[in-house]
Amino acid sequence: MNFDQLWADLHPIGRSADSGGYHRFSWTGADAEARAWFTEAATARGLDTRTDRNGNLWAWWGSPGPGAVATGSHLDSVPDGGAFDGPLGVACALAAVDELRSRGFSPARPLAIGVFVEEEGGRFGVPCVGSRLMAGEIDPERVRGLTDASGLTWAEAMAAAGPDPEMIGPDPDTLGLFDVFVELHVEQGRALEDTEHPVGVAGSLWPHGRWRMDLRGRADHAGTTRTIDRADPMVPLAHAVLAARAAAEQHNARATVAKAHITPNGTNAIPSLVSTWLDARAADRETLEAVVEQVRKATEQAAHDHGVGLTIDAESFTPLVEFSHDLRDHLAEIVANRMPETAGPVPILPTGAGHDAGVMSGHVPTAMLYVRNPTGVSHSPEEWARPEDCRAGMLALADVLQDLLSRSGREDFR
Ligand code: GLV
Ligand code: MN
Ligand code: MN
């Protein structure tokens, strides 16, 4: 199976020997290796590979042009991420081309396989940068100025990797070529395991966002500063963590404080600055706003009580995505036909995870396939999918692409 070879070749790239997790951050050496893996695999298949103005990669089966079917995902990871989130969709897309060729299928229109840059926001903080830039949903000037943990800007990192950061921005020329986009992704939950389905279809993506909170205190000696004299930003940080937890429980939402930079980060020094991030998600916008407001208020109160300054900035926000019902239902039918032995309707799943498909859906009829994840764990070295489910996902994607590529004109999937 060609998928196995693709997967084996990608496996060591950016992998930590200690944890088995991945550190594939945009515009780093590991990213360059992962991109080279894609380009080599595409070239070996006779696909014409191009880099768009935003650094996204596109491998074309057939002449690049309008009326194309697009698929793909991303190769970047969160810190110590899993092997499947992103790469599964890319490897399955390449393997699906092999599968369709082995069926003797010739497409009536071109297929583009995409690799989007910085989907996770693992290096520069904002997720789905490649698709947002392409769709004109983020200011290129802002992107050029985004910094990583070391203070390096996007512009510097991108230029060092090769592509010209002055070129980034809306790309209607590329986006306009696509009639439909389908992203295959590992499920980040256990719904498919619970319902005994190897493959499911996306219904919606919850609205979600990231809020940066800077807590400014006063650096001082841990051994000599009386408690009453302290302006310690760690205390409101602790309140923020607890408030996020409480708000998530209360609203049946998700709220996470998982990242903090502590300055100067010494055991015996009260910090001068804590920068921390709230990641919040909910089924609807009102609930999300209530969650964020609750965390904001609790953190503001604690900062005030402890003489700490606070600024809060929304770094990214993605509204609710409801995928095209026609296309979603069409995919579910194709999946059901492939797996007639699977009992019950193909699950149509909402998720709290974000995807480039969510950005694409605002511009092109878009759908997603999910591959079963037995534990549901994701953004972790433990993320996993059974080989037979990966194959089932790849075959389902091949069926979907075969169907879409057989049509000669723009289809009305809205
Ligand atoms: C991306 O995977 C996200 O949902 O954070
Ligand atoms: Mn992810
Ligand atoms: Mn992903």
Image (cartoon, rainbow, N blue to C red):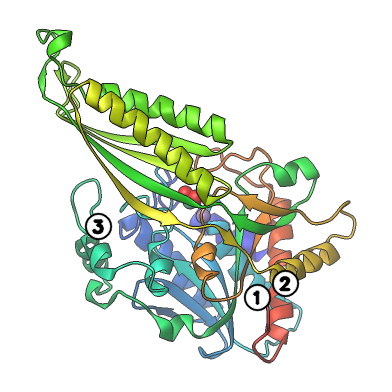
Q: Mark 3: which secondary structure?
A: loop
Q: Mark 1: which secondary structure?
A: loop
For the C terminus, give its image quadrant: bottom right
Q: Mark 2: which secondary structure?
A: helix
The part of the image, by quadrant, that contains residue 405 is bottom right
Position of residue 10 in the picture relative to residue 348 (left or right): left
Kind of residue at disc 3: Leu
Q: Vertical placement of 413 versus 250: above or below? A: below
Provide residue 142's location: percent of width, then percent of height: 25, 63
Q: Which mark is residue 414?
A: 1
Q: Nearer the viewer, residue 283 or 410?
A: 283
Q: Identify the residue at horizontal 42%, vertical 80% (top origin).
A: 50
Kind of residue at disc 1: Arg
Position of residue 370 in the picture relative to residue 81 (left or right): right
The part of the image, by quadrant, that contains residue 224 is top left
Choose the circle earlier in sequence order: 2 or 1: 2
Kind of residue at disc 2: Asp
Mark yes or no: residue 274 visible: yes
Q: Vertical placement of 201 versus 362: above or below? A: above
Provide residue 118's location: percent of width, then percent of height: 39, 59
Tag 3 residue: 146
Which mark is nearer the camera, 3 or 2? 2
Q: Identify the residue at horizontal 63%, vertical 89% (top origin).
A: 109
Which mark is nearer the camera, 3 or 1? 1
Q: Nearer the viewer, residue 403 or 398?
A: 403
Provide residue 344's location: percent of width, then percent of height: 87, 52
Tag 2 residue: 326
Q: Nearer the viewer, residue 302 or 380?
A: 302
CB-based contact (under 8 Å), mark 2 and mark 1: yes
Q: Vertical placement of 399 versus 375: above or below? A: below
Q: Give the distance between the C-alpha atoms of the residues marked 3 and 2, in whole angstroms.
A: 38 Å
